[in-house]
Image: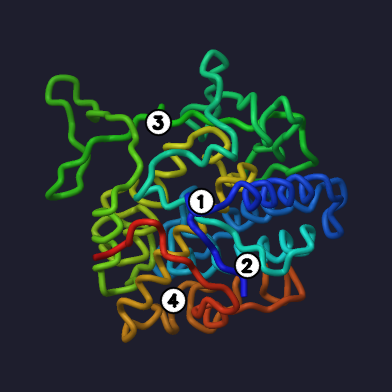
Amino acid sequence: MPVRKSVRALSDAEKTELTDALTALKNEPSTTVPGLSTYDTYPVLHQRSMENRTPWAGDTPNSTMRNSAHRGPGFLPWHREFLRRFEVDLQRISGNPSLGLPYWDWENDPTFPEFLGGDGSLEQLQSVEPILYGSFVKEGPFGEDAGWAVVDQSGANVPLGPTQNFPLQRAFGVANIPERDPATGAPIVNPTTGDFQMKKAELPSPLDVQNAIAVAEYDRAPWSETGGLDSFRNVLEGWWRGPRLHNIVHVWVGGTMGPGTSPNDPVFFLHHCNIDRIWAVWQATHPGANYEPQSGGPAGHNLNDPMFPWDGIANPDVVTVADVLLLGAVSYEDPPELLVG
C-alpha cells in the first residue's frame, strides 16, 4: 500500500524518484489529448472542472459560481480522485507501485519544499490576471533552465493548447490580501481612504488547521463559498473569513499556482495531498458526521452523484462522491509533529 509522507520525512532517494517520475510524465506523450504530455493533461482537466458550473436553486450566475471541483461540497472528493489518478500515473511511469505522493504540511513547516526548486526571480516580476504576482523560476528540476514549461494559462473558454514554452512562475509571499476583523471576518476598511487595509499573505498555522478540524458540520446550504458558512469544507477550502487554508497557500506561492491551470506547478499535488490528509483527519475525528448534501443539492455534489469528468459522459469512467469518501488503498504517515494534540 502506498504511504504518503511529509516532505520532511523523505529521503534524498525518494525525492529524486519523485522528481524523476514527474519529469517522465512531462515528457511522455498523452494517450488521450493529442499534442500534450501526460502531465499536461492534469492542469487542463483542472481548468475544465472550473469551467463546468454547477448551479443550484436560487444561484445567481456569475464568474465565480460553484463548479464541479471548487466552491462547493465536491471540492474535497473531487480532488481526492484527482490525486489518486495522478499518483497511479506516477507509480506506473516510475515502475514503483508503492510510490506515494508526499504532502507539504505547510502548517508545521512553512519552508517551501526545496527539492521542487525555489522562488521566482523578482527582477522578472510579471503581473498576469488572475494572478497578482508571478516571476520566472530559473533553477531546479522544474525551472526555466531545465526546460519545464506550462500549459497555456489563457483560462475559461479559450482552448488550452500544447505547452507554450512559458516558464513556471512563483512569488513567495508577495501577494497582498485584505486584513480582516478577527470577530466578524469582514475586510477592514481604512477610514481615511475608504480602501481595504492590506497585508502580505502568510501560510496557515497549526492552530488554523486545528480550528478547521474542530468544525463538526461538513457543509450546508446553499453549498457555496458564501460568507458566514462556517462549515468544515468552507473553512478548509478557504472561503470562511478567507482567503484561508487551501486558498491562501495558492496565493502565497503565487504565479502559476493562481489560475485554473495551477497543477502546472508540481507543488500543487503536494499541497492538495495535505488538504486531503486534513480531510482524512477530520473524518477520523468526526466519525458520525455525514457528507452533505446527501441529495437535493447541486448536480455533481450530492453523495451518489457522478463527478465531472468521471461521469460516463465526458469520460467513460464513473466515479461518485460516495466512491471516494474512504481513502482506499493509500495511507498517511504522521508528520514529524502531531497535527493535533
How far across and down, in percent of the image, does residue 156 sit?
62, 45
Question: The residue tagged with tag 1: helix, strand or loop?
Answer: helix
> Can you say which quadrant of the picture contains the N terminus?
bottom right
In front: mark 4 or mark 1?
A: 1
Q: Tell me which label, 1 or 3, sits earlier in the chain.
A: 1
Distance between the alpha carbons at the discs numbered 2 and 1:
18 Å
In front: mark 2 or mark 4?
A: 2
Q: Check whether the beta carbons of the residues at disc 4 and disc 1 lie within 8 A of each other.
A: no
Question: The residue tagged with tag 4: helix, strand or loop?
Answer: loop
Circle 4 crowding by C-alpha within 10 Å: few under 14, some 14–19, many from 20: many
- What's under tag 4, amino acid-wise? Gly
Q: Give the colouring mode of the picture.
A: rainbow
Q: What mark, if any, has residue 173 been given in the picture? A: 3
Q: What mark, if any, has residue 297 been given in the picture? A: 4
> Can you say which quadrant of the picture contains the C terminus?
bottom left
Distance between the alpha carbons at the discs numbered 2 and 4:
25 Å
Position of residue 237 relative to residue 306, above or below, is above
How far across and down, in percent of the image, does residue 141 sit?
68, 36
* Residue position marked by numbered label 2 in the rendering: 84
- What's under tag 3, amino acid-wise? Gly
Question: The residue tagged with tag 2: helix, strand or loop?
Answer: helix
How far across and down, in percent of the image, does residue 281 sit?
37, 70
- What's under tag 1, amino acid-wise? Val
Corner quadrant of residue 165:
top right
Q: Check whether the beta carbons of the residues at disc 2 and disc 4 lie within 8 A of each other.
A: no
Corner quadrant of residue 228:
bottom left
Q: What mark, if any, has residue 171 been given in the picture? A: none
Q: Nearer the viewer, residue 53 or 319?
A: 319
Circle 3 crowding by C-alpha within 10 Å: few under 14, some 14–19, many from 20: some
* Residue position marked by numbered label 1 in the rendering: 7
